[in-house]
Amino acid sequence: MNEAILKNHPSLERATLGGGCFWCLEAVYQQISGVSAVVSGYAGGAMSNPDYESVCSGQTGHAEIVDVYFDPALISYRDLLEIFFVIHDPTTLNYQGNDHGTQYRSVIFTHSDSQSAVAHRVVKELEEANVYSNPVVTQIDVAPVIYPAEDYHQNYFRQHPGQGYCMAVVAPKLAKFRSKFQSLIAPEFQ
């Protein structure tokens, strides 16, 4: 599925980000102008074709990620990273809020040397500006094989806004994004 998006839309680029539960990241990135698709998935582990249960066990080494397909003429990779560093805590190793385990680590999987350079530059700028009281622990690695999550994880917040986790965790992150990045919200979400 993920490769087909790029094949059918060659002007798009791909950003792969992990920062806790993929439902949170997906809900935010789906509302950004210039983003064409967001696919929740798994990356960075040792097992082929992992499923949600195996990833949640913490034994596969995968992170929950989102693949963000964007038009660089409308939104920059740097903008996507700036959003990323606001909507999760990049200073906590292997957890976000109540979600604990390596599957919730802060990670940027890059798809080019240019993306790697931008990611390293953004982290360096955040640290030099002392944005956080603790060091940034976000991993920056070359994108490995990426596996789409099961269909029931795709568009999760849109389909289940009243679900407990969505109301308690996803909705506040979405609200934080919307308050800080109003100019980047797609018109259909204004």
Image: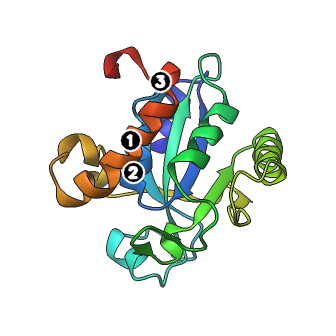
Instruction: Look at label 3 and name its amino acid.
Output: Gln
Q: Residue at x 55, y 29 (%)?
A: 70
The outermost residue toward the left is 162
Depth order, front residue of 1/56: 56
Q: Quadrant of the C terminus?
A: top left
Q: Position of residue 106 (x, y in %)?
A: 59, 62
In this picture, residue 72 sits left or right of residue 41: right
The answer to whether any part of residue 34 appears in the image is no
User: Residue 138's image quarter?
Assistant: bottom right
Residue density around tag 1, few if under 14, some if 14–19, many if 20 or more, within 10 Å: some
Depth order, front residue of 27/170: 170
Q: Residue at x 48, y 85 (%)?
A: 59
Q: Which residue is mark 1?
A: 174
Q: Which residue is mark 3?
A: 182
User: Helix or strand or loop: what does disc 3 sit on?
Assistant: helix
* Disc on res. 24: 2
